[in-house]
Image: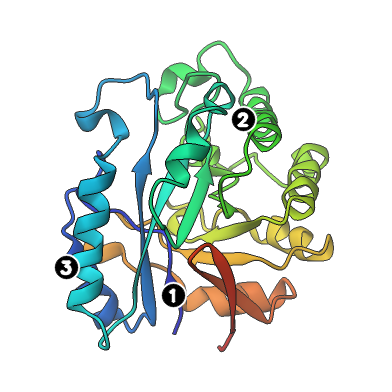
Amino acid sequence: MLWDTHMHTYFSSDSEAGIQEMIEAAITAGIDGVCFTDHMDVDYPYEVPQGFCFDMAEYYQAMTEAQNQYKGKFPVRIGMELGLQAHLKDRLPGMAAAYPFDFVIGSSHLVHGMDPYYTEYFEGKEEDKAYQEYFESILENLAAFDCFDVYGHIDYIVRYGPNQNQFYSYGKFADVIDEILRTIIQNGKGIEINTAGFKYGLGHPHPTEQILKRYRELGGEILTIGSDAHKAEHVGFGFGKVPGILQEAGFRYYTVFKQRKAEFYPLEG
């Protein structure tokens, strides 16, 4: 099958899932291995439990215990999803290096202090301009950070747009998206195929098939796979579609990180 290397537990403010619960769901789904990537969003401006941060010592201990519990039975790796904001460029690198994580996803959940999850981000903006601002903020983050391994769900914003992806396409934003992809490749980083787009009814993964193909055309090789599951029932969600999508885009391998180093696994399907 495939590794699911983007998943959340009760250490994330938007999940109540247990660690063992998620692992058992992965085993049942036929997943080959998992990496936990709970949310670390420093300076999250909205009131949510824990403020979208977790106690790193407690987190690493709990994940290590799970890793040891399943040692020799099922591979469990430890990572986090780091919420990137350019003004945090002096804080986040130290957090990413504080523990021997296997994998760090860098993600854009906030655009200049606003989360597109909330409708206020789109108020007074044309949808296309709101999307453009989001993509441009990714470029700002890429200029500020080197402390992650892959950039998460690059077109995350379309989950929450007024029309989601009804009027969205790679072609509309090709200039800025190509610049994002080139910068990621030049910096030795990767992207992910995030299957939560199917869960949100978009009919496509994050990013879309066209963007995945373009990434490969530009020379991109590092590509991880994640369900972005926040519940056990979503572990490996839509993974049956992944090999075909990636092979159509020109990939023959996908990536799993161990001790922040890329390992390549052949695609089958």
**Which quadrant holds the C terminus?**
bottom right
State the CA–CA distance, disc 2 to disc 3.
Answer: 35 Å
Q: Which mark is residue 3?
A: 1
Residue marked by disc 3:
20
Q: Residue at x 39, y 34 (%)?
A: 41
State the CA–CA distance, disc 2 to disc 1.
Answer: 29 Å
- Residue 256: give x, y in percent of width and height: 52, 71
- Residue 108: give x, y in percent of width and height: 53, 36
Q: Which mark is residue 134?
A: 2
Camera sees residue 11: no
Q: Earlier in the sequence, mark 2 or mark 3?
A: 3
Q: Quadrant of residue 188?
A: bottom right
Q: Residue at x 24, y 53 (%)?
A: 9
Depth check, front residue: 249 or 100? 100
Q: Earlier in the sequence, mark 2 or mark 1?
A: 1
Depth check, front residue: 180 or 29? 180
- Residue 158: give x, y in percent of width and height: 54, 40
Q: Amino acid at mark 2?
A: Tyr
Residue 58's place in the image compared with 22, above or below, is above
